[in-house]
């Protein structure tokens, strides 16, 4: 069964350091999402790609966060510099998204990267 | 601004009982309402979903009830099992084929044997 892959699974860093997370979506999935899930909360969208283009990055703290999906396949999310408040689970999801506008493709989530900033 | 309010925060149910989780939404642009199930250390997985033109949807032991006029929807888990112990998230989606999910804060369900 195809799955969304993420690495690393766990990351511990000190504040002001740079961190990067990698996501490989399910093959053929055009849309890729990065979510942040704070402990005890639901996931919140950070950035959404359609192929290699950013569709929505309105909730991405652009002063410190960046995301790219250069070839429209895998993606990297970077934080520089990390702050204590960035400690959270970072989830990647993908969906097929080639259908009409009124059809909703399921978002498949990866296992996430648990970030702890000390 | 929290657009999807979920309750309760936690729920303990005996094996064989009915688990009920409630959600209320504010954004009338939502046109798709999925429920996700998340086990510890895993990402959320789609459990069941409903569109607002339907009042109820049932898949096995899981049922969504939807009240468009009240802007509320709920998940019922019949004959709850210990394996159902997980965190459940409701969500609203307003974003066309690419999806734009707004999640509730989640309900941690524990089913006691």
Image (spheres, coloured by chain):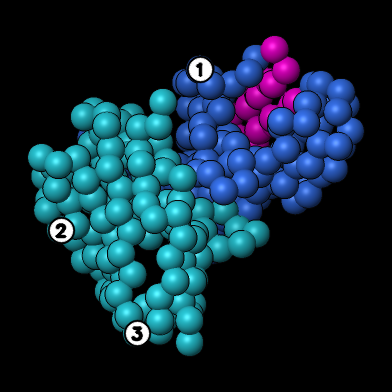
Chain colours: A blue, B cyan
In the picture, the disc for residue B56 is 2
SS assignment at label 2 = strand
Q: Are marks 1 and 3 in contact (CB under 8 Å)?
A: no
**Label 1 Cα neighbours within 10 Å, binned few <14 / some 14-19 / many ≥20:** few
Using the numbered discs, state the Cα–Cα distance from disc 1 to disc 3 in whole angstroms. 44 Å
Using the image, tell me which numbered label, if any, was put on residue B16.
3
Whether B29 is drawn above or below A89: the answer is: above
Task: Tell me the chain of label 3.
Answer: B
Q: Position of residue B106 (x, y in %)?
A: 46, 51
Q: Which mark is residue A112?
A: none
Going from the N terminus, do you reach mark 2 or mark 3 first? 3
Same-chain check, marks 2 and 1? no
Residues tagged by mark 1 and mark 3 found on one chain of the structure: no
For the image, the number of numbered tags is: 3
Disc 1 marks which residue? A58
Label 1 or label 3, whichever lies nearer to me, is 3
- Please state the extent of the stretch shown in magenta in the rendering: A63-79
Picture layout, residue B62 above or below residue A51:
below
Marks 2 and 3, how far apart in space? Answer: 22 Å
Residue A53 seen in the current view? no
């Amino acid at each position: 069964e195809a799955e969304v892959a993420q690495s690393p699974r766990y990351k511990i860093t000190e504040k002001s350091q740079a961190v990067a997370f990698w996501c490989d979506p399910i093959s053929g999935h055009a849309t890729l999402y990065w979510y942040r899930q704070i402990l005890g909360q639901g996931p919140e969208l950070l950035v959404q790609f359609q192929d290699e283009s950013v569709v929505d990055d309105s909730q991405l703290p652009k002063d410190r966060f960046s995301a790219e999906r250069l070839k429209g396949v895998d993606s990297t999310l970077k934080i520089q510099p990390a702050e204590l408040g960035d400690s959270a689970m970072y989830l990647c999801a993908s969906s097929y998204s080639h259908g009409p506008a009124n059809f909703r493709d399921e978002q498949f989530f990866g296992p996430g990267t648990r970030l702890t900033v000390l | 601004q929290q657009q999807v309010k979920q309750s309760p925060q936690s729920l303990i149910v005996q094996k064989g009982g009915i688990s009920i989780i409630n959600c209320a939404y504010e954004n009338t642009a939502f046109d798709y309402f999925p429920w996700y199930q998340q086990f510890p250390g895993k990402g959320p997985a789609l459990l069941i979903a409903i569109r607002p033109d339907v009042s109820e949807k049932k898949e096995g032991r899981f049922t969504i009830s939807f009240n468009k006029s009240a802007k509320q929807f709920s998940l019922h888990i019949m004959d709850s099992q210990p394996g159902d112990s997980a965190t459940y998230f409701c969500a609203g989606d307003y974003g066309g084929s690419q999806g734009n999910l707004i999640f509730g804060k989640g309900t941690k369900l524990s089913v006691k044997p």
